Amino acid sequence: MPQPTQAPSFDLPAPGAPVVHVRRRSGPGCFVGLVIMLAVVAAPIALVVFSAGDAIDEITDAIDSVPDITVPEPPAEPEQPAKPPVGVSGRSMLAPANLRKALRRLDRARLGRVTLLRLSPDRVDAQLVKGGRQRSAQVDFEGDLARGPGSPGGSGLSAIALEAIDVRAPARLVRGSAARYKVRERGIDYLVLMPDPIEGQRWTAYFKNRVYVQGDRSGRVVRRID
């Protein structure tokens, strides 16, 4: 009759029996294997790192080789011309101080005596005669003097010395006209000074609304011209 199978026994050794301890393998052989394994793993990584470094260097060299680009500055805006003055004050040539400077410019140029003077807020236009020759000249509100070529003639014309012109007369005539007639100081267009056989000089003011006023040599209102 077969014997019953018994489960394997896992009994501990009896006390005092010799016990064999199994230690992990170590030594040069294991170290060499570890080094070889690390070398195998590290080689592809190093190749990738060196390749990436070369690519970065090439990109940096390419960037360095690009010439510097200088962005041109936008062109300067053209200087706007000064706005012409109006009325009888500020930079207007009708203001006594400005008219005095303009007449001095003409006097220093030695162009002669005035046969006709046209005065507007932005400039002085003069017809002058000297030594049997006549010419035109202009002084604007910025102080620039321009003169035309001389031509024969004018020896028989009546003329006014520059120093004999009352520089206060134009503004006085404009203000007197504004007080008496339906005109404004800023509405003055121009004035004309001409020799007069009785007074020696005569001013006429021309306003933009077509009102014309005559004044004496000092700028006092004489009458309105219709």
Image (tube, rainbow, N blue to C red):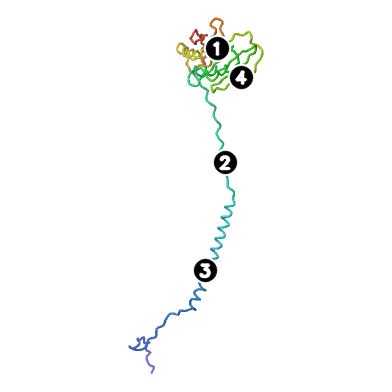
18 vs 224: above or below: below
Amino acid type indicated by mark 3: Ala
Q: Earlier in the sequence, mark 4 or mark 2?
A: 2
Q: Nearer the viewer, mark 4 or mark 2?
A: 4
Determine the CA span between mark 3 and mark 4.
94 Å
Residue at 50%, 73% in the rendered image: 35
Q: Earlier in the sequence, mark 1 or mark 2?
A: 2
110 vs 29: above or below: above
Q: Farthest residue to the right: give it.
A: 152
The answer to whether residue 35 is visible is yes
Amino acid type indicated by mark 2: Pro
Q: Residue 134: name its quadrant.
A: top right
Q: Which residue is the site of mark 1?
A: 193
Q: Which residue is the site of mark 3?
A: 42
33 vs 70: above or below: below
Residue at 45%, 12% in the rendered image: 179
Q: Nearer the viewer, mark 3 or mark 4?
A: 4
* Element type at mark 1: strand
| Residue contact between numbered discs 3 and 1, judged by CB atoms under 8 Å | no
Q: What label does residue 72 carry, if any?
A: 2
Residue 150: image location, x then y, percent:
65, 16
Q: Earlier in the sequence, mark 4 or mark 1?
A: 4
Q: Nearer the viewer, mark 4 or mark 1?
A: 4
Question: Is residue 135 toward the left or the right of residue 187 in the image?
Answer: right
Q: Earlier in the sequence, mark 3 or mark 4?
A: 3
Q: Which residue is the site of mark 4?
A: 147
Residue at 48%, 19% in the rendered image: 89
